[in-house]
Image (tube, grey):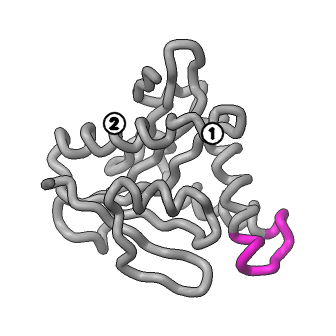
Amino acid sequence: MDVTLRNMTQEEYPIWIDVSTKQQALDRCSISQKHFDEEYKNLLDMLRKFLPDHQKTKGHIFLSIDTLEDKNIGYVWCAELPDLPNQSIFIMDIHILKDFRSRGIGRIALQKVHNLLKDAGFRMVFLSVLNQNYAKKLYASLGYVVIRENEFTSTMSISLLD
């Protein structure tokens, strides 16, 4: 499978915001038991503060995932967060559209993200995943290890030095 990463376009950014925020709101509802509309509104408010310059906000990387046959079938958002160790980055969101899951695209995309981040000088990657999310097994199979876990979520990391 030929999977490529490219910078997200201005036209794709609002589509990604919509897809990502709705999924995150659903995920948060599963933990908080709050209503979807409340979680969705809270996330939109948070994003406005966290990304004041949208996709041009310093320290953030927004990528679209393509295959030879299909364009914009997934998204990746990475951010340099102040509480991370030097040369570390956090994968804030990785999303493959439902019709393209279970084809190995996420695995290949993550491997390419790792290469891109390593080439950019990052040494560690962190992410957070719901414990019941099947992607947690994918992350573990790629070498991510759980560094913090609670009843609902796990924070995982991988070294890019290997």
Rounded to the nearest angstrom, the CA distance separating label 1 from label 2 is 17 Å
Question: Dot 1, how many residues are within 10 Å of its Cα: few (below 14), some (14-19), or many (20+)?
Answer: few
Task: Estimate the x, y position of residue 24 in percent, counting from the top left.
Answer: 66, 60
* Labels 1, 2: front one: 1
| Kind of residue at badge 2 | Lys
Q: Residue furthest top?
A: 69
Q: Look at the image and give the residue range highlighted in magenta.
A: 28-38
List the residue tagged with mark 1.
101
- Residue positioned 60% across, 59% down in the render: 134
Q: Is residue 92 left or right of residue 26?
A: left
Q: Secondary structure at mark 1?
A: loop
User: Residue 116, percent across and down?
Assistant: 26, 38
The x and y percentages for residue 96 are 59, 40
Q: Residue at x 77, y 71 (%)?
A: 29
Is 136 on the left or on the right of 142, as rendered?
A: right
| Residue 112: numbered disc | 2
The quarter in which the C terminus is drawn is: bottom left
As drawn, is 135 to the left or to the right of 45? left
The stretch drawn in magenta includes residue 6: no
Residue 98 to residue 21: above or below: above
Measured along the vertical axis of the image, is residue 73 above or below residue 148? above
Q: Quadrant of residue 141?
A: bottom left
Residue, x 53% and y 66% (percent of image)? 129
Whether label 1 touches label 2, CB < 8 Å: no
The structure residue drawn at horizontal position 25% and vertical position 39%, both measured from the top left corner, is 115
